[in-house]
Image (cartoon, rainbow, N blue to C red):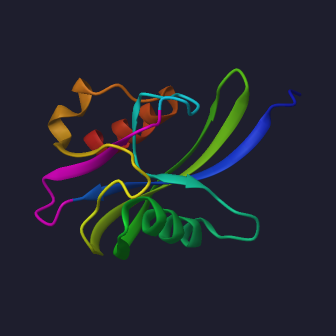
Amino acid sequence: MNNLKVVEVVAAAIFSGCGKKILIAKRPDKAHQGGLWEFPGGKKEKGETARQALHRELKEELAISIKDSESLIRLQHEYPDKRIELDVYKVMSFTGEPFGAEGQETQWIYLTDIKNYEFPAANQAIIDALVVG
């Protein structure tokens, strides 16, 4: 049994109003897996449900409020220094105009172009669920 630190995280695959584009964000260079693209989200706080964390994180990171979402995938991924337990939601509608409220770069991309962006290894299962699903 390994003693890796377990980090509970939520993330969102946020679709544009027309449903053809998805929002991605660039991780800060100094962060774990810095400089890579990701699906917006963050760590769950003690006592929070995954949905509560998702609503809070998207408000903090992107200044949006979720109107309609559904669970997409749950996964675990081990990095050499930690294990990530990730709850991912598909966000179909929201209020507000998303932007990098914490200074991070964001970009709307066509899902068909996602292979042109470098993501952390833990995100591959999310990409597969989006492309296949």
The percent coordinates of residue 123 (x first, y second) are: 45, 35
Q: Residue at x 49, y 26 (%)?
A: 121
- Quarter holding the N terminus is top right
The percent coordinates of residue 35 (x first, y second) are: 42, 28
Q: Residue furthest top?
A: 80
Q: Residue at x 73, y 25 (%)?
A: 81
Horizontal relation, residue 47 to residue 31: left or right: right
Q: Is residue 74 magenta?
A: no
| Residue segment shown in magenta | 16-28
Q: Residue at x 41, y 41 (%)?
A: 126
In the image, is residue 111 above or below residue 64? above
Q: Quadrant of residue 6?
A: top right
In the image, is residue 59 above or below residue 102? below
Total labels: the figure holds 0
In the image, is residue 81 above or below residue 61? above
Q: Residue at x 27, y 50 (%)?
A: 23
The percent coordinates of residue 71 (x first, y second) are: 45, 62
